[in-house]
Image (cartoon, rainbow, N blue to C red):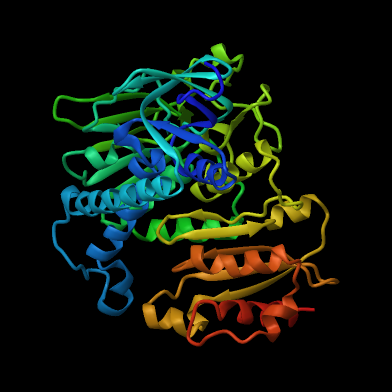
Amino acid sequence: MPVGSSNHFDLVVIGSGPAGQKGAIAAAKLGKRVAVVDRTEMIGGVCLHTGTIPSKTLREGILYLTGFRQRAFYGRDYTLKENIGIQDLTSRVATVITREMGVIREQLNRNDVTTIHGRGRFVDPHTIQVEGDSNEALTADYVLITCGTRAARAAEIPFDGKRVFDADQLGQVEALPRELIVVGAGVIGLEYASMLSALNVVVTVIEQRPTILDFVDQEIIEALCYQMRRRGAVFRLGEKVTNIQVDESGIVHAHLESEKRVRAQGLLYAVGRQANTDSLDLEAAQLKADSRGRIKINEYFQTEIPHIYAAGDCVGFPSLASTSMEQGRLAAHHMFQAPMPVKPLVFPYGIYTIPEISMIGKTERELTEARVPYEVGIAQYEEIAKGQMIGDDTGMLKILFHPDTLKVLGVHAIGESATEIIHIGQTVMSLEGTMEFFRDSVFNYPTFAEAYKVAALNGLNKL
């Protein structure tokens, strides 16, 4: 189709999740003609409909309705509502999704981004066929693939959406089980396991690997497991599920390689994610994906075909909404020769378990393996006035720093507002700051941010 046609764009974005939105808007702000292709019901992408927004909204609903944050004051049996059902939680999710969809549509419209409803697939490297309300072919100088992911499935698992379900189906189950098996102790598995344990669901987590989330500070993971075990969670690590059956009474039986058998009223299968690239006809664009559907890219988010870029979950780690937004923006800037940051992206990681976890920079294990000397400064929430006020006396903030230069090497937090206060550490690390900044700064009192000063004093006192 010739340039100048109404169906020709400078950039066509396949997918409207965080990476697609920000990539499209960044290109539009550079004066480019941009189209975003996605199904009407999926505007906002997986992030809005089955991933980040629903799971985090569900978490907030659980914390509110169970009165979880107030139990330190009013007792472990305190709850705002008895007999919390799935509808109590999903109604809140539906409201947030509707409002966010409106915000996303307005942002795209305000930036003159054309939204085309339907499924996109490649006809050739420059042509996208849209199948939906109006079948049409689009041509583009550049293409950005941001198609997101779905819950990975194994063919032998008897999914029925009621007793055996994946993370994308959790919000659709008819009733919350009193006992639940969670297969997979990755980020998603642990998030849902911890949320449901806060609802007094008896959770058994089964993980094939002998350890949990190796990229997270070990002390932080130990604290999370301790908190979950206090709520009745059971961890079976180094165990492989060989067979799953549902008996006539509706009880799920998980058979393990070690000959153990775990029984529960429901099973959540949370073993990774599968990219949605299998519907794009990548071969027509001379591209290919790995077994998980992920597309290989370079440091500028270019695929093997220079004018085709990819960003977000479909390229793999870190698969965060926050990093996907920046990846989409940077991809658009590179394809249209706009200014790019010269330093590598330093990003925080947020894990929305109960309690929540956040981190940025190096862990103790990574520094030890790299033979980098370090010292540790710790602030326990029990010694922070804010922690006492809200009833979180188990949280902590941990700062790793070089004993000679005092440069901050990593920040790790667990507890209330961990994913919020991590950005203070992110800023200081990005500016190559030292522990002296935390020591000499004045923080509002009482706040969780004050933990940085307490941790800095704790660490510097060790030198």
| Image quarter of the C terminus | bottom right
Residue 281: horizontal and vertical position, in percent?
A: 49, 15
Q: Nearer the viewer, residue 58 or 185?
A: 58
Would you place residue 134 above or below residue 213 in this image? above
Horizontally, is 115 left or right of 67 in the view? right
Would you place residue 286 above or below residue 408 in this image? above
Residue 302: horizontal and vertical position, in percent?
A: 66, 31
Would you place residue 61 above or below residue 44 in this image? below
| Residue drawn at point x = 61 percent, y = 76 percent | 452
Residue 193 in view here: no
Residue 335 in view here: yes
Q: Nearer the viewer, residue 47 or 285?
A: 285
Would you place residue 85 above or below residue 2 in this image? below
Quarter of the rendering containing residue 324: top right
Residue 262: horizontal and vertical position, in percent?
A: 32, 35
Residue 448: horizontal and vertical position, in percent?
A: 50, 77
Horizontally, is 157 left or right of 463 in the view? left
Q: Nearer the viewer, residue 241 or 268?
A: 268
Horizontally, is 299 left or right of 13 in the view? right
| Residue drawn at point x = 43 percent, y = 62 percent | 355
Residue situated furthest right in the rendering: 404
Residue situated furthest front in the rendering: 4
| Residue drawn at point x = 46 percent, y = 71 percent | 394
Count the marks.
0
Q: Nearer the viewer, residue 366 or 138?
A: 138
